[in-house]
Amino acid sequence: MMRHLIQWIIYSLLLLGIAACGDADYNKDAYVPFGSVDELSYEVLQSIKDRDSDRFLKLLDNQQVVNDLLDKASGDDVTDLKARRESPQGKRAESVRRLAEKQRIHAFLAAGIPPELAEQLPQLSSSGIDFSGEKPFAEDSPAKLQNYVLHVNTPESSSYTMGLTIIYWNGYYHLIEIDGYLEKL
């Protein structure tokens, strides 16, 4: 009995310690976080296979994580970026960027998938995801900006790639940009 009590206390303290190590500025409920890059890449591939633009856009709905990180970051480049972002022109540019992103995804899923690939969408599979680089999100930022290349294959062994830009923060991965849509190798 005493042994179980001691184990319970140790586990409780461990969980409290892990929770205390988390970033207090991190607001998981405001973001679309993934526990692993594999989980994130699976969701990207599924949204393509299903031609589900709403699902795809939801995966990219991480502007709040960018805003929160910029609000906590320092440095001249970040100060300039914050000032531009808050200006009327910056707000307009962000609105235009988001609209363009939606249009790109809708166009890609509706008509941009190569004809030879369109019939094979349900059979697409990932042959892996490669890490291609990392840098700090900003000066003094707790987050990292990471780049990955998702490899997609058809049943006939045709290979395609898709670049993913991800923010890694507080142990979670957040998709913020797609760099190229199923480019044939």
Image (tube, rainbow, N blue to C red):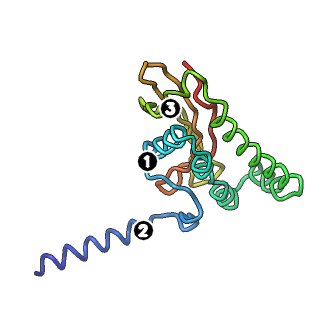
The percent position of residue 30, horizontal first and vertical second, equals 59, 64
Quarter-wise, where is residue 106 in the image?
top right
Between 95 and 172, the one nearer to me in the picture = 95
The three-letter code of the residue at mark 3 reads Leu
Task: Identify the disc placed on residue 121.
Answer: 3
The percent position of residue 111, horizontal first and vertical second, equals 67, 32
Residue 148 vs residue 72: left or right? Answer: left
Q: Nearer the viewer, mark 1 or mark 2?
A: 1
The percent position of residue 118, horizontal first and vertical second, equals 56, 28
The first of marks 1 and 2 along the sequence is 2
* Quadrant position of the C terminus in the picture: top right
The first of marks 1 and 3 along the sequence is 1
Residue 161 vs residue 36: left or right? Answer: right
The first of marks 2 and 3 along the sequence is 2
The three-letter code of the residue at mark 2 reads Ala
Mark 2: which secondary structure?
helix
Q: CA separation, marks 1 and 2?
A: 19 Å
The three-letter code of the residue at mark 1 reads Ser
Between 99 and 139, the one nearer to me in the picture = 99
Q: Residue at x 43, y 19 (%)?
A: 157
Task: Identify the disc placed on residue 36.
Answer: 1
Mark 3: which secondary structure?
helix
Q: Which residue is mark 2?
A: 19
Q: Residues within 10 Å of mark 3 (few under 14, many from 20)?
A: some
Between 108 and 92, the one nearer to me in the picture = 108
Q: Do labels 2 and 3 touch, CB within 8 Å?
A: no
